[in-house]
Image: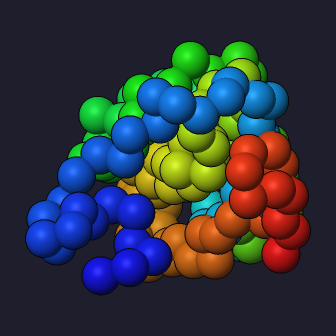
Amino acid sequence: MTGLTHLDADGAAHMVDVGAKAATAREAVATGRIAMTRDAAAAIAAGAVKKGDVLAVARVAGIMAAKRTSDLVPLCHPLPLTRVSIDLALDDDGVTATATAATDGKTGVEMEALTAVSVALLTVYDMAKALDKAMTIDGVRLLAKRGGKSGDWQA
């Protein structure tokens, strides 16, 4: 089972030991999209969703989710995040979320950025589902990462 860092020599799942690694500046950017009807997007734009300001709540939800990633993804290390930002771009038929997570740590923040995007989009769905139950979330992916032993990467 070589090359799989979350498996030990016997194939059992374990948390990777990062104790000997040097702390470095690390950053990750992820994105995703929720597609919806034009009417639902227009209601969000107009601030006419009964549950409140969809984009403001989704932004806060994404930030909160990034901070709780290790509680949600079993083998993730808890990280001292130095920054999490969520950009939500509303257009005529949906919302594109882009999250950036950063830390000065011993392991990367890709999972935090991906979790932030996912929960931000789920929050948009939750707040607007009365307007469009057929909304779809897709394209959640890593766009870039910086720092760490494996170096920089970009999609």
The answer to which of 115 and 93 lies nearer the viewer is 115
Residue drawn at (69%, 65%) of the image: 142
Q: Image quadrant for the C terminus?
A: bottom right
Residue drawn at (76%, 37%) of the image: 26
x%, y% of residue 92? 82, 69
Residue drawn at (40%, 63%) of the image: 5
Regarding residue 143, the answer to whether it shows in the image is yes
x%, y% of residue 109? 62, 42
The answer to which of 112 and 47 lies nearer the viewer is 112
Task: Name the image quarter holding residue 63.
Answer: top right
From what the image shows, is residue 108 above or below residue 131?
Answer: above
From what the image shows, is residue 118 above or below residue 106?
Answer: below
The answer to which of 155 and 61 lies nearer the viewer is 155
x%, y% of residue 111? 53, 50
x%, y% of residue 136? 51, 76
Tally of numbered discs: 0
Residue drawn at (29%, 46%) of the image: 15
In the rendered view, does 139 fall on the left or right side of 137? Answer: right
The answer to which of 115 and 144 lies nearer the viewer is 144
In the rendered view, does 132 fall on the left or right side of 101? Answer: left
Regarding residue 103, the answer to whether it shows in the image is no
In the rendered view, does 47 fall on the left or right side of 51? Answer: right
Q: Image quadrant for the N terminus?
A: bottom left
Visual colour scheme: rainbow
From what the image shows, is residue 123 above or below residue 25?
Answer: below
